[in-house]
Amino acid sequence: MRALVISGGGSKGAFAGGVAQYLIQQLKYDYDIFIGTSTGSLLISHMALGKVEKIKQIYTSVNQSSIFSIRPFLIKQKHGHQNISINHLNVIRNFLRGSKTFGESHNLKTLISETFTKAEFEALKATDKDIVVTVSNLSLNEVEYKSIRDYDYEDFIEWIWISCNYTPFMSLVKKNGCEYADGGLGSMVPIEEAVKRGATEVDAIILQTEVTHFNRLPSKNAFSLITNLFAFMLDRIENQNIRIGKFAAANNDAILNFYYTPSVLTTNSLIFDKEKMTAWWESGFEFAKNQNKELNQIEP
């Protein structure tokens, strides 16, 4: 059984889309298992359906308004760099509404339901493919994996949305009596889960560089400090997941193929820029092509 695992990474998911496109369309890999965390969960259903061009158009066209119903930050351009600062009005308004988070992401849930239809859900559920999204159960302090096989359309749409909710900047969701947030808070790269589900070969797309780089500018304000702290935490989780995944694969004689980003794409993955994301998608495709150049030479 072959699995495709796509890590979390916000807007950097566009790079993962390009890599997955090459693996599916050019190398003709037929995956039995698709597992995504956060941004990865947005990609896997369409990849499993083979609707690569559709998700590419959707993914590279999103902006802040596509994601946030209440955006908690402002984006400022200075010296060629994009910096974020707190949107005090929106944050205060959200707290006065009784929200526990700085911002809300209900627009993203609407986008998911509009672009992944019930007919597509039913078609995918009728196949033998297992589509799994990662969520973090904050109430039980556990990571949970939600398979398309276990839920109806409305529930699965909500699990995809929950997997992407980068709390506290996006919505905190209460479901089944528990509070849920972004799957990346517990498992950024769910390789171990793919192996547990029977995968004997795993293609893992990791949305960070293989070698650590000094890639963050100094914090400009309290809000950018919080994002930097969360980014640091998620990087540590990601590295731990990779080590655990390698251990699980070795103990089960599974083959691991890694696709890291060759360079730092962005220092703030909450910023969605159409031009940059389109370029990242293309660079992901080219990167996968170059990484598999030996296979290219024997292709007819």
Image: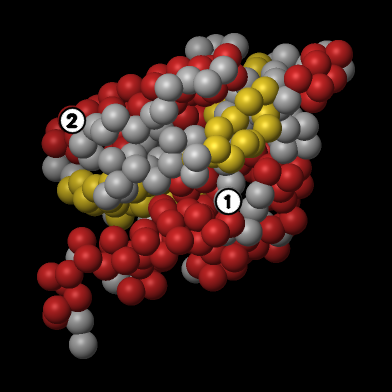
| Amino acid type, residue under disc 2 in the picture | Phe
Instruction: Looking at the image, tell me whether mark 2 or mark 1 is earlier in sequence order.
Output: 2
Horizontal placement of 293 versus 67: left or right?
left
Residue 143: image location, x then y, percent = 47, 23
Q: Residue at x 28, y 62 (%)?
A: 288
Q: Nearer the viewer, residue 116 or 149?
A: 116
Distance of mark 2 from mark 1, alpha carbons? 37 Å
Name the residue that disc number 1 marks.
273
Q: Residue at x 55, y 33 (%)?
A: 83
Residue 168 position by quadrant: top right
Residue 179 position by quadrant: top right
Q: Residue at x 43, y 57 (%)?
A: 280
CB within 8 Å, label 2 to label 1: no
Residue 74: image location, x then y, percent = 68, 32
Q: Is residue 294 above or below residue 148?
A: below
User: Can you see residue 271?
Assistant: yes
**Residue 247: which numbered mark, if any?**
2
